[in-house]
Amino acid sequence: MVSPNNKILEKEVFRGCYDVPCASHGTMRGGPQWMTKSDDRILEVLDDLGAALSMRGMEVNSEILDNRVPYGTINDRLPKLIDAGLITTVDEHEQWYMITENGSAYLDGDYVPPDLS
């Protein structure tokens, strides 16, 4: 497979593209290169429910909403989403997470997250 800059991409880039940045797939909304489709799904779960959730709560609700994101993926992606200001913690132990205004604006197509790469 060839990337936009005509470099040959290794197969590992495409394996599990929901869990890692993928040159051919990116996010569903065309976010920055570091974002994945799983990031969009995590944000959608938090936005749809409008409540603070634990990581386990995100996993369970993603299944209920037919938008499954595995716990391990949530655990791996949350730090980036927090660094980008799309999700925030709402308790002193940083175990409950809520979407921010920027996160909702991103889902609506009104905000482009910063490049963290």
Image: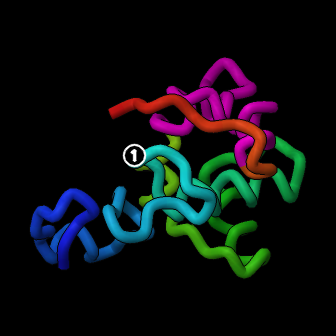
Q: Residue at x 62, y 35 (%)?
A: 95
Q: Is residue 47 left or right of residue 67?
A: right
Residue 113 lies left or right of residue 12; in this view the side is right
Can you name the residue that lies furthest to the top here?
A: 92
- Frontmost residue, 23 versus 76: 23
Q: Is residue 96 visible?
A: no
Choose between 18 and 89: the one closer to the eye: 18
Could you tell me which residue is drawn at 77 percent across and 77 percent down?
64
> Is residue 53 on the magenta stretch?
no
- Which residue bears the numbered disc 1? 34
Residue positioned 47% across, 57% down in the render: 36
Q: Is residue 65 visible?
A: yes
Q: Amino acid at mark 1?
A: Trp
Give the extent of the magenta segment: 79-106
Q: Say what secondary structure mark 1 lies in.
A: loop
> Where the N terminus falls, by quadrant?
bottom left
Q: Position of residue 61 (x, y in %)?
A: 75, 67
Q: Is residue 20 above or below residue 25?
A: above
**In this picture, residue 105 sits left or right of residue 37:** right
- The x, y position of residue 94, in whole percent, is 61, 28
Q: Residues within 10 Å of mark 1 (few under 14, many from 20)?
A: some
Q: Residue at x 69, y 69 (%)?
A: 62
Residue 77 as seen in the image, left or right of residue 89: left
Locate the C terminus and report the quarter of the image it occupies. top left
